[in-house]
């Protein structure tokens, strides 16, 4: 094959390359722990430590945290009990808990702290571990530009390869308060993701139940549990059907049983036709146990070179080679 043909093939290859591959399991994480001063809340001692996520790695690449959303909104139906369920990591010292006690459910989910999270997030019902949450929105006040490097991730407490299903969609427009007003395509992630190993080692934790909506200051029940680890999944801009160069304002998480098929339907979480109020809270249904590292945008390390730049360079080389060949024959 001539040099010219090699270069042309390379240009065509680069034209199709650069889009991040489909969802990938997270294989490891990098964290930064800040030690706090212990305090008491709800009859427990919280060590007030923060284990913040700084990067994660898949089988193919590493991604750094690039920004954190400005807003978090918890969308609830009017049918089931107005409840919240959360978990905190045990410190290993008596009944002490490692993390920071939070008084607001949304703030907890948005705190970038792997020492806590939500339990049975989208499970609907009237039992102590189920509630009325239909959707959780994480939005940025300033638009994010879609590039090959942009990615989001979801992390869940759970056993290896037993991580729960969920759905996700990019927010493509917001109002003045940061509420989503338009969405991109809905992506559904079936249960069982996470790979052959968890991204984070097993830990002990304690569950807390609340019956006052987003206010999580007076538990109705708290109990120790068995050990579980931390699973993660990377979601690329391509997975969300986004166009390079377009802008978005964040993303929303919801249960996999959402039936919405248009942007307008996704916006209307109060419509039980699109957001069923009977979502199963069991494993594999709406029972995802989110770690409190949501509302974060990640960037591929190193960021991929723009396809336009690569293709332009290769075409220039092709042109120069072609011209030199023509001149040498004349």
Image (cartoon, rainbow, N blue to C red):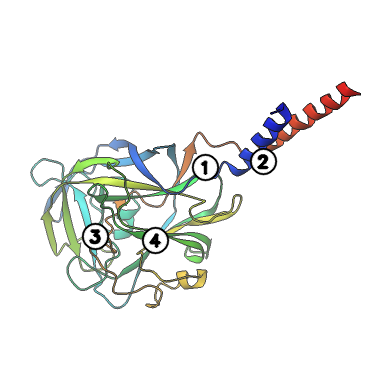
**Secondary structure under the numbered disc 3 in the rendered image:** loop
Question: Are discs 4 and 2 less than 8 Å apart at CB?
Answer: no
The quarter in which the C terminus is drawn is: top right
Q: Is residue 227 visible?
A: yes
Q: Earlier in the sequence, mark 3 or mark 2?
A: 3
Q: Are the residues flagged by discs 3 and 2 in contact, CB closer than 8 Å?
A: no
Q: CA distance from mark 3 to mark 4?
A: 15 Å
Q: Circle 2 — which element?
A: helix
The residue at which mark 3 appears reads as 283
Question: Percent position (x, y) of residue 219?
Answer: 16, 62
Quadrant in which residue 313 is drawn = top right
Say whether disc 4 or disc 1 marks the residue closer to the N-terminus: 1
* Left or right for 103, reference 153: left
- CA gap, disc 2 and disc 1: 15 Å
What count of labels does the image hold? 4
Dot 3, how many residues are within 10 Å of its Cα: few (below 14), some (14-19), or many (20+)? some
What residue is disc 4 on?
167
Task: Please give the residue where the numbered disc 1 appears in the rendered image.
Answer: 149
Left/right placement of residue 290 relative to residue 127 reads right
Please report the residue visible at 25 percent of the width from the left and 37 percent of the height from the top. Answer: 35
Q: Residues within 10 Å of mark 1 (few under 14, many from 20)?
A: many
Q: Which mark is residue 308?
A: 2
Residue at x-position 48% and y-position 53%: 239
Element class at badge 4: strand
């Amino acid at each position: 094959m001539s040099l010219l043909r090699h270069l042309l093939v390379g240009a065509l290859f680069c034209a199709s390359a650069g889009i991040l591959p489909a969802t990938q399991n997270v294989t490891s994480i990098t964290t930064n722990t800040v030690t706090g001063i212990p305090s008491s809340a709800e009859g427990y001692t919280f060590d007030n430590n923060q284990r913040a996520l700084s990067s994660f790695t898949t089988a193919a690449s590493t991604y750094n945290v690039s920004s954190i959303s400005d807003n978090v909104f918890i969308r609830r139906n009017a049918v089931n009990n107005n409840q919240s369920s959360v978990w905190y990591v045990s410190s290993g010292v008596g009944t002490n808990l490692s993390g920071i006690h939070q008084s607001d459910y949304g703030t907890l989910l948005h705190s970038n702290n792997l020492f806590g999270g939500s339990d049975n997030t989208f499970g609907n019902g009237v039992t102590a571990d189920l509630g009325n949450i239909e959707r959780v929105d994480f939005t940025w006040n300033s638009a994010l530009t879609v590039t090959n490097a942009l990615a989001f991730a979801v992390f869940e407490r759970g056993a290896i390869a037993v991580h729960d299903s969920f759905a996700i969609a990019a927010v493509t427009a917001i109002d003045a308060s940061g509420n989503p007003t338009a969405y991109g395509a809905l992506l559904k992630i079936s249960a069982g993701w996470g790979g052959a190993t968890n991204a984070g080692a097993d830990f002990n934790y304690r569950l807390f139940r609340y019956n006052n909506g987003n206010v999580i200051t007076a538990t109705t029940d708290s109990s120790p549990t068995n050990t579980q680890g931390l699973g993660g999944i990377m979601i690329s801009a391509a997975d969300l059907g986004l166009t390079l160069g377009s802008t978005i304002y964040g993303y929303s998480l919801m249960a996999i049983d959402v039936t919405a098929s248009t942007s307008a339907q996704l916006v209307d979480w109060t419509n039980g036709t699109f957001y069923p109020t009977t979502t199963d809270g069991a494993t594999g249904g709406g029972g995802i146990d989110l770690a409190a590292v949501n509302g974060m945008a990640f960037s591929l390390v190193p960021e991929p070179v723009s396809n336009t730049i690569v293709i332009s360079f290769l075409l220039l080389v092709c042109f120069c080679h072609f011209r030199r060949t023509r001149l040498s024959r004349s």
